[in-house]
Image: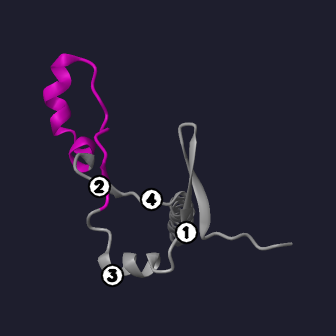
Amino acid sequence: DIPDEYSYGSIRVGNSEFNTTLSQSTEADLARNGTDGWYHRYENNGWRPVAAKTLKEADLDPVTQRTKYMAKRYHYSKVKRKEDKVLKNKQKKREWYKKIYLE
């Protein structure tokens, strides 16, 4: 088998396809410049009340208050996001096992 070349690829936009190349310095640039200017996702989905009279109470809801301004890191690479998700799930599972076995 011939190994895949991962530094070359293409991006599809609509019906057009554009060739891309990944430079060797990409990882070094990320380490040097950081990710401060990147997109950060803010979650605005606390629970949403239906009745108008509960709107005032909704602002006092602790879940809504806690999640109102939480930002999630969003990495540009789908592969990296998938890896992060797997690691997060493993960590949650470990914490759950610790909780069960220590009680």
At horizontal 54% and vertical 61% (from top left) the residue drawn is: 20
Count of marks, rendered view: 4
- Judge whether 10 appears above or below 29 on screen: above
* Amino acid type assigned to the residue bearing label 4 in the image: Tyr
Q: Are marks 2 and 1 in contact (CB under 8 Å)?
A: no
Q: Which residue has dot 3 on it?
A: 32
Pointer 1 or 4: first along the chain: 4
Q: Which mark is residue 94?
A: 1
Q: Earlier in the sequence, mark 4 or mark 3?
A: 3
> In the image, what residue type sits under mark 2?
Ala
Amino acid type at circle 1 is Arg
Q: Residue 18, how many percent across, how many down?
A: 55, 52
Residue 71: numbered disc: 2
Disc 1 to disc 3: CB gap under 8 Å: no
- Is 15 on the left-hand or right-hand side of 70? right
- Marker disc for residue 76: 4
Which residues, given as a range, are shown in magenta? 38-66
Could you tell me the amino acid type at mark 3?
Arg
N-terminal of the pair, mark 2 or mark 4, is 2
Q: CA distance from mark 3 to mark 2?
A: 23 Å
Dot 1 alpha-carbon crowd within 10 angstroms: few under 14, some 14 to 19, many 20 or more: few
Q: CA distance from mark 2 to mark 4?
A: 16 Å
In the rendered image, which quarter contains the N terminus? bottom right
Q: Could you classify mark 2 by the number of other residues whose Cα lies within 10 Å: few (under 14), some (14-19), or many (20 or more)?
A: few
Mark nearer the viewer, 3 or 2: 3
**Depth check, front residue: 63 or 26:** 26
